[in-house]
Amino acid sequence: MKNNIGYITRKIIELENTKNLFEWEISNIFIWEIIRYQIYSAIVFNNGNEKKVNNRNTMDYFISKFFNNFSKYINAIVFNPFLDFKESDILIFESSRKLLYNNQYIDPYTNFIREDLENRGLKVTRYQSSYAYDRLSKRNFKIKHLDLVFFISSLFKNLSQQKFSNSEIDKINDLESWLYNEFSISFDLRSIINTELSQFRINSFLYRLLLRIKKPKEIFLVNFCDKSSLIDCAKKNNINVVDIQHGIISSEDIIYHYPNVKKGSLRYFPNKFYTWSKIWTKTCKIPLETKDIIIYSNKFLLKQNIKFKNLKKIDNQIVILSQPGLTNQIAECILKNISMFSMLNIVYKLHPNEYLQKDKYKSLLEIEKKENVHFASKNIDLHELLAKSVLVIGVYSTALIEAASFDCKVVLLDLPGVEMMRPFLNNTNIIMFKTKVT
């Protein structure tokens, strides 16, 4: 089944193994390490159930974009990371996810690690990189922003054109043919590679400058996939880089799964990986030695469990967890089985990225008409919602595992991507809904 995420993962791994892609260099840059996830995610999305929906033809969009861009420019100047000349022991590159905790927005993945480091007397500098979400957190001149890095990178990324050798062109053409034959998707790899090489060089220059100023001993980051140049610069300066788990990791998903790679050999993969529990060390082949995979519990979830442990469950309340790429399929699945839920109160929880697009999906609008369904607000505390609910339905997401920790029964819909949840099916609170509905 070609839209199965596990199938796509296996085929990409087969490709990179047979064609020795991890040793593929262009101008001394190991290009496959950089574009691996980009290619994979494009295939997953294009083999899914829906195309991107956008709202860019509305006046509201253009007005919003204008003010957002203006704010970003101001942000880039005021919180310029290159004007901070104080040395730090630790640099933390936060995720774009911001959740409310003790009346302020925090990054749930790095906040408690930062507190632990500061309690040890270490000097820490924080960097934020997503203005749309980072503006939720309290402004602090000690927290720097990467807007300037992104602006410079975007400005210069198309100014230089890579000159490919004949052998490089042959290899690129060969890969394009393979990808088209296997997935019926046409990739312009020359354009992709040219852009990525250009951005890698620009970002490398900027991050070298930043590391020279800050002189850190260690870097913590969330999601290594878009930080190749930072990781490369750090490693070349003997600075440890630690990646922090921020979601499901699985052998059915390519992001952290490198079954044919010598441990510790990747150039743009972090030196260490913080994972939430021992079970995650067995779900895929992380390309690090065992000693470099460190268990660091999900403290945010543990604190939320304690906070809401005495909340009473609301009888018959269930939660539907939507997610990008499966928005329509999940909604249609619920509609086709709506009679099963007639006596239940349904709270439909969209992913943050889906709220602006909600009205573009007829299936969501149809669900909204049902008397026993209401859509959760974007800013609702998801953990409080889970703590009050008896059942949660979804396909694959960290929130489903979190739901089980709040004593919810979890039902997995048999849709593309559900294979990533297989390691958790031995949990008695998690079951598969086998009925095919598509």
Image: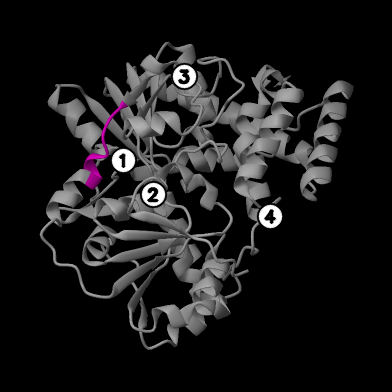
In the rendered image, residue 223, in percent from the top left (x then y), is placed at 45, 37
Three-letter code for the amino acid on which mark 1 is drawn = Tyr
Calculate the distance from the C-alpha at mark 3 to the C-alpha at mark 2.
23 Å
Three-letter code for the amino acid on which mark 4 is drawn = Asn
Instruction: Look at 35% across and 39% down and name the residue there.
Output: 94
Calculate the distance from the C-alpha at mark 1 to the C-alpha at mark 2.
13 Å
In the rendered image, residue 272, in percent from the top left (x then y), is placed at 40, 21
Q: Secondary structure at mark 3?
A: loop
**Residue highlighted by disc 4:** 47
Whichever of labels 4 and 3 marks the residue nearer the N terminus, that label is: 4
Q: Nearer the viewer, residue 250 or 77?
A: 250
Q: How many marks?
A: 4
**Residue highlighted by disc 2:** 398
Q: Give yes or no for residue 410 being in the magenta stretch.
A: no
Calculate the distance from the C-alpha at mark 4 to the C-alpha at mark 3.
30 Å
Is residue 289 positioned above or below 162 on the image?
above
Whichever of labels 1 and 2 marks the residue nearer the N terminus, that label is: 1
Q: Secondary structure at mark 4?
A: loop
**Residue highlighted by disc 3:** 288
Instruction: Look at 21% across and 24% down and name the residue there.
Output: 123
Is residue 74 positioned above or below 65 on the image?
above
Q: Nearer the viewer, residue 280 or 298?
A: 280
**Residue highlighted by disc 1:** 109
Three-letter code for the amino acid on which mark 3 is drawn = Leu
| Viewer-side label of 1, 4 | 4
